Image (cartoon, rainbow, N blue to C red):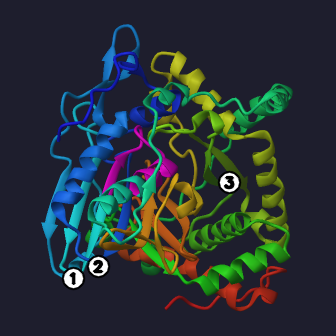
Amino acid sequence: MQPQSVPSETLFPMRLSDFEYYMVTDDRPSHPMVFVMVVHVVGLLHKPEFQNSLQELIASHPLLGCRVEKRPDKGLSWVPFVSVENVLEWNDVDSETAAHSVPEVRSIDISSQSGINVKVLAAADRAQMVMYLHHACCDGIGALQLIGELFARYGRRTTSPDMKQPEFDAVSPEVLLQRENYDAGEAAAKRQKKSLGRIIGKVSRLLLRAPIRLASSADFQLVSRGTSDSSTASVRQMNSHAIQSRVLPKSVHRALRAFAAQANVSINDLFIREMMLQICDWNRKGGIKFGRRWIRLAIPLSMRTSTHDGMPSANVVSYALVTRRERDCDDSAELLRSIHQQTSDVLFNREGIVCLKLFRVLRRIPGAMKMFLSFKTVLSTMVLANVGDVRRRFNGRFPLQKGRWVAGNVLIEQIHGVAPVRPNTRAAMSIGDYAGDLSISLRTDGQVLTAGDSSLFLEEFLQRLLSIAKHPEQSVDGTEDLPEPG
């Protein structure tokens, strides 16, 4: 594909940000730093119009048209391709395949390939689009912006003259230079200076506290067989699924929001609590003893401010870490209160600065980032991301049909996505709200969790949410009795 315009020479070569450097350093063949977005559409997706829309999208978002190269004067830097080719894979399939096919894990060599790869399974009445993105190019919010713009461009090409067209805002490539500008104003800067001691304390706890790993399929087999022999073929069977997704209806979403409001917490606090409890129960069933170790959830945080308005796809993200001992999960009501107190503190103090400062220090010491990622083998038990209302993450608008985007001749039925996993952080989950429904997606480490066990973990988490929605009065004091997953 030929970009419409060559990126400005004043931008490139452009040195990688600290977060981008972290993502490139942590990329490995066994655990590629590539996340997946899945879009289900209803209607006949036209290949020429889609292909041209994708070409325009890549031309408008410079990092998608770049590779990473080490430059003597800048170190690892973004360098634009003359042309971007072989990005789209189009497959004509039957409706059943388009609806139910499960995407597989893919690697992207960011030193020689574009950071975007798109696979389409197109049937006569529906299609599934899978967008693979290298995490050095883009974060989850940026990915949703890309999907919105891609289908807005497609919709403008396929909308009939008497129909309303989708709209999208043009991006400004020069704003990419601001992607490491996290200044949120004078008041925030004063708070961050005052909290230097707290930052040092948080980094120390990150380095010294050893998080527990999620129980693997081998652990469960040891429990079921009562043997120390874990070298069976079933345990070693690879799970190549890049994402498993489920949808909870509006009624459940409304009930969960009502429960959170009654408890004076956010629905995100509720998700974090339920995942802590899920990990506790999962590891107990897997025979994992916690001892002095901790459960740690890595929560992605957007660091975007008005400074980043109009920026093409990029990473303006960090992590907050929610860490609790197993005994902290015995009282679920108190656990929810403590999580709410911490997450409110995160919003006030922009706790994501802590991880970014750590990445910056490690980058300045030759070899330190790679050594840290190798030595600190368990950074977190799991990644849990809540992107909120998917439609609000797109800076544009679509005609709507029952709350869903209408993109010309197709209807965007569902949007799913999930982050990659790294060694020993065996699972990542993403939660989003689209047209009122809750999309819940899971990615697991296919080397240690089978597809069946991954599906079971997801179903058990869903049962927790369904139980709260059905019996909110039993979930206030931690006495809920969860049904067995079906």
Is 222 situated left or right of 285 in this image? left
In the image, 438: left or right of 479? left
Residue ID for mark 1: 95
Residue 132 in the magenta stretch? The answer is yes
Give the residues in magenta.
Answer: 131-147
Location of mark 3 (residue):
294
State the image quarter where residue 68 is shown.
top left
Residue 360, position as x, y percentages in the image: 58, 24
User: With respect to residue 360, does 441 lie above or below?
Assistant: below
Q: How far apart are marks 2 and 3 (CA)?
A: 39 Å
Q: Is residue 103 magenta?
A: no
Residue at the image position 34 percent from the left and 8 percent from the top: 72
Label 2 vs 3, first from the N-terminus: 2
Give the residue type that dot 1 points to: Ser
Front-most of residues 277 and 130: 130
User: Which of the two labelled residues, at mark 3 and mark 1, occupies the earlier sequence position?
Assistant: 1
Residue in front for this viewpoint, 140 or 200:
140
Residue at horizontal 43 percent and vertical 67 percent from the top: 415
Q: Could you tell me which secondary element the residue under label 1 belongs to?
A: helix
x%, y% of residue 403? Answer: 52, 76
The circle drawn on residue 99 is 2
Q: Where is residue 378 in the image (x, y as percent from the top left)?
A: 54, 46
The residue tagged with tag 3: helix, strand or loop? Answer: loop
Q: Is residue 245 placed above or below 35 in the rendered structure? A: below
* Amino acid type at image mark 3: Trp
Q: Are marks 2 and 1 in contact (CB under 8 Å)?
A: yes
Are the two marked residues, 3 and 1, in contact with CB atoms closer than 8 angstroms? no
